[in-house]
Image (spheres, rainbow, N blue to C red):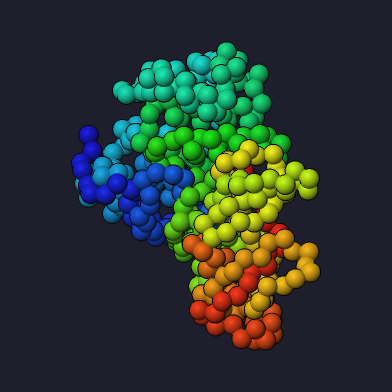
Amino acid sequence: MSASASGDGIQARFKLAYSDFTLDVDLNLPGRGVTALFGQSGSGKTTLLRLIAGLEQTPDGHLAIKGDIWQAGNTFLPTHCRPLGYVFQEASLFPHLSARGNLEYGMKRCRDPLDRAALEHVVELLGIGRLLERRPHQLSGGERQRVGIARALAVKPSLLLMDEPLAALDLARKAEILPYLEKLHDGLDIPVLYVSHAPDEVARLADHIVVMEAGRAVASGPLTDTLARLDLPIKLGEDAGVVLDAVVAARDEAWHLAHMAFAGGRVWVRDAGLPLGRHARVRILARDVSLARAPVEGTSILNTLPAVVIDSVDDAHPALTLVKLQVGASPLLARLTRRSAHALELAPGQRVYAQIKAVALIG
């Protein structure tokens, strides 16, 4: 059994040096929800995951999961003693067993697997009930991966590790499985560490983000707050921006629009058919936000919200500046030319109107 430690989250401290790479991290992560380990290939994401799983070891590492010590000093729980589930890029199901047989194989070797009711709940969340009697060769890539995730959860882990679980899938299969991962996100009560370099996965699934670069965590925090940082603008893909939790508050069926309410206001988006009251995320890129000192009339821009300037920094190009705003309880980023910012005489605390040209609904 593992020793006890204080805290209800994840404390991970590792330093590992190879001839051409050094990993040096010290992280305190939430004990629930999805934490994305995000960064380019070679940034150390998978190495960190393997250290947490016990598949690699560094003598002076420290790891505590919800108060239980998995590694510290002379204590080191081997992988098979760590209550974790691990999902790799490939599902690697046993080809001679059915999907059900693959689930039961791991459960038989676990001292405290899920009970029948809990397993049925996982099967329902992942939509694999009709697949249970099929062999792996009878499943699509997305179906095999969903069975692999169910197998990882069947052992009732205290922590779920997912190492780029969609990387081996084509776009169609990836689009098929993402909604199931979103349902899983809402239905799990354990922390998930999700390795990815895909911006769309992070934007849709993550609650917390750790940005890895050259073996170090250069940023770590709640997704929305971290994306809104000016000292280290994080680009999920093509541009800086924020991801906000929202709910479908109203619909304009005549114009095929949905009104999404978030902690700060409402924005119109293209109607994706989500029912009223449904929670979803919206993404607003800095390049799609302009500012005005007074409300603008006679414009094609549907979304105009009162905001307060928090701060601004020079952007990558000398002609541009990146402005952080507060809209109610939510942060927002706007990219302006420095000339426009000068003309508006922008300063912290100033009240302005944010005109939002485009808002993306992401699940």
**Residue drawn at 51 percent across, 75 percent down:** 310
Across and down, in percent, residue 268 comes to 68, 54
User: Looking at the image, can residue 168 be seen?
Assistant: no
Question: Residue 134, located in which quarter of the rendered image?
Answer: top right
User: Looking at the image, can residue 350 be seen?
Assistant: yes
Judge left or right: residue 293 versus residue 124.
right
Q: Tell me if residue 79 comes above or below residue 330 in the rendering.
A: above
Q: Tell me if residue 296 comes above or below residue 53 in the rendering.
A: below
Across and down, in percent, residue 25 comes to 39, 58
Question: The C terminus lies in which quarter of the figure?
Answer: top right
Judge left or right: residue 212 versus residue 335.
left
**Residue drawn at 28 percent across, 54 percent down:** 60
Labels in figure, total: 0
Q: Tell me if residue 75 comes above or below residue 101 in the rendering.
A: below
Judge left or right: residue 276 versus residue 252.
left
Question: The N terminus lies in which quarter of the figure?
Answer: top left
Across and down, in percent, residue 12 comes to 34, 52
Please state which of residues 257 and 158 is positioned toward the viewer in this rendering: 257
**Residue drawn at 44 percent across, 44 percent down:** 33
Please state which of residues 64 and 361 is positioned toward the viewer in this rendering: 361
Please state which of residues 333 and 157 is positioned toward the viewer in this rendering: 333
**Residue drawn at 62 percent across, 65 percent down:** 305
Judge left or right: residue 27 versus residue 60.
right
Across and down, in percent, residue 222 comes to 46, 56
